[in-house]
Image (cartoon, coloured by chain):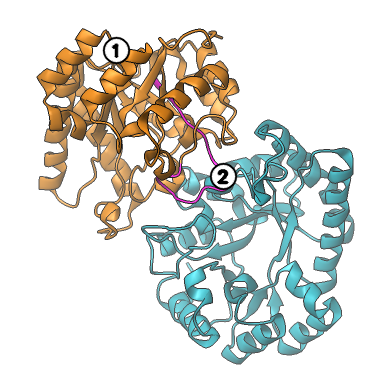
Chain colours: A cyan, B orange
Amino acid sequence: MRELSGDVRHLSINAATARKQLTLPALIEACARRGIGAIGPWRDQIQAVGLVQVARQVRDAGLTLTGYCRGGFFPAVDAAGLSGALEDNRRAVDEAKALGASCLVLVAGGLPGALAGAPAHKDMGLVRAQVRDGIAATLEHARSVGLPLAIEPLHPMQAADRACINTLEQALDICEELDPGRSGALGVALDVYHTWWDPKLADQIARAGRERLLAYHVCDWLVPTRDLVNDRGMMGDGIIELKKIRGLVEAAGYAGHVEVEICSQAWWSRPADELLDTCVERYQSVV
Amino acid sequence: MRELSGDVRHLSINAATARKQLTLPALIEACARRGIGAIGPWRDQIQAVGLVQVARQVRDAGLTLTGYCRGGFFPAVDAAGLSGALEDNRRAVDEAKALGASCLVLVAGGLPGALAGAPAHKDMGLVRAQVRDGIAATLEHARSVGLPLAIEPLHPMQAADRACINTLEQALDICEELDPGRSGALGVALDVYHTWWDPKLADQIARAGRERLLAYHVCDWLVPTRDLVNDRGMMGDGIIELKKIRGLVEAAGYAGHVEVEICSQAWWSRPADELLDTCVERYQSVV
């Protein structure tokens, strides 16, 4: 297992973590100043600044781009919606490639309309089939440009509205079906927040192996958790066995960045410097 | 698949549903008046009235008692805590037997102290081992008195504080280990709220079969869900495919009651008659 306490070269900050405090250029600057090795940018943040400018700033700062967030949201109620989603994912692949991101993170999507509180239907089997087909189509384009896709299983409490892929096993089953050769073109983004509870986690991490583990995200699970989306905890403040899970991931061959993704109303209301300094401190002490 | 729209003989009301409005005697009376076939009582409610009196009232009203809620909460930080939990479960078995309940529902328990917001440690592997051992010990006593135990997997969002058994597959693995002969002494309580999201649900229901399916609970998953514990929906108000899942359960051989368990701040604040009448109406129209 790697020793991470000495420096922060393998630390990545997912830009959602400081979304309310910092623009992407300000985050890049703040990370570079601390010696943090990478960031994980979001699409809306890139669009607000401009892809070329962000790519140049990242390169000049010597940062790495871990996964680009996010593609996916494949399900739709009709053919136009389905093909619109595919077109959008194609663009996301191209953007990730132009940025030099290590992969495109795919959040599957759930029941159409559910995120807005008005689900068009209840057929989870249908949306899961649409997601599988959407990943297959996107993979074809992603392969052609040489950009890996990372399926991110989300916590079952987000199955209806955000992602109908809810366990690592389920994500790996799709990987095996669409990329049986383990080519590196298709894998998973493993976030401890979404997967820590899974009794099969250790087995499935071992099954994933180096070729499938494309990104590794950390934060913590608070007890109690008061919101299903924006109440993630700072590493060390909750009950996730962070060192143990990182040990499993590294034993399976993962040697990439450890990306901090904390979506938290509480942390969004604190100063950016306090937030980032705490991320660094906890990364070195408890991750 | 059974036709349930004609009467409510196979409907059971879990007493948590009207916990804030009705005492247990009042609930029994209200259910009997509507022709509802069964109730699922909670231990604290029984203790408030007296076991003998409840047993007599239930018998006189011609009701059935579906699962007795609840045993479990096996994990502890020391030997005294572990044996105290076993002693308590032994009493719960005896109470369920004296009441004539069809089974004792087991909610495994999570990290010791977590329910009070102060988890004593983070070792999910340890608490899962303690739960397995606790069920094994309780099963020995339950077999001797002829009272089936029903393990209830809870939603993964409740893994830390309420139950470290979080999928039907995980519960069935324990059943298989401790009761390989499928004797009927050990099975599961399947609640759609906790399990609807599971991509392996259909397969695992089929695997469970008639001998393992000891109780079936319904309510609905609201979009959005605003609380991790007490924001369950009335059947039909959310996105769970209730008819489809009941079809799977009955195809596997289940022919028992359909028990409504709605823990909801919103419904607890409405009149009991409105709540129960709505349960009856939705049971007949959407379940």
Give the residue drawn at x 42%, y 38%. Answer: B267
| Res. A211 mark | none
Pointer 1: residues within 10 angstroms few (<14), some, or many (20+)? Answer: many
Pointer 2: residues within 10 angstroms few (<14), some, or many (20+)? Answer: many
Magenta segment, prevailing SS (helix, strand or loop): loop
Where, by quadrant of the figure, is residue A103 drawn?
bottom right
Residue bearing the label numbered 1: B64
Answer with left or right where residue A30 lies relative to residue B229: right
Q: Can residue B214 be seen at all in this image of the molecule? A: no
Where, by quadrant of the figure, is residue B48 drawn?
top left
> What chain does mark 2 sit on?
A
Which mark's residue is nearer the viewer, 2 or 1? 1
| Residue closer to the observer: A60 or A117 | A117
Q: How many marks?
A: 2
Residue B268 at x, y = what percent?
37, 39
For the magenta stretch, what is the residue range?
B213-231
Answer with left or right where residue A235 lies relative to residue A187: left
Residue A7 vertical placement versus B173 (above, below): below
Residue kind at label 1, given as amino acid type: Thr
Residue kind at label 2, given as amino acid type: Thr
- Judged from the image, the secondary structure of the residue bearing numbered disc 2 is loop
Give the residue drawn at x 48%, y 35%. Answer: B193
Residue bearing the label numbered 2: A167
- Judged from the image, the secondary structure of the residue bearing numbered disc 1 is strand
Q: Which quadrant of the rendered structure holds the C terminus of chain A?
A: bottom left
* Separation of residues labelled 2 and 1 (CA atoms): 38 Å
Residue A49 at x, y = what percent?
79, 80
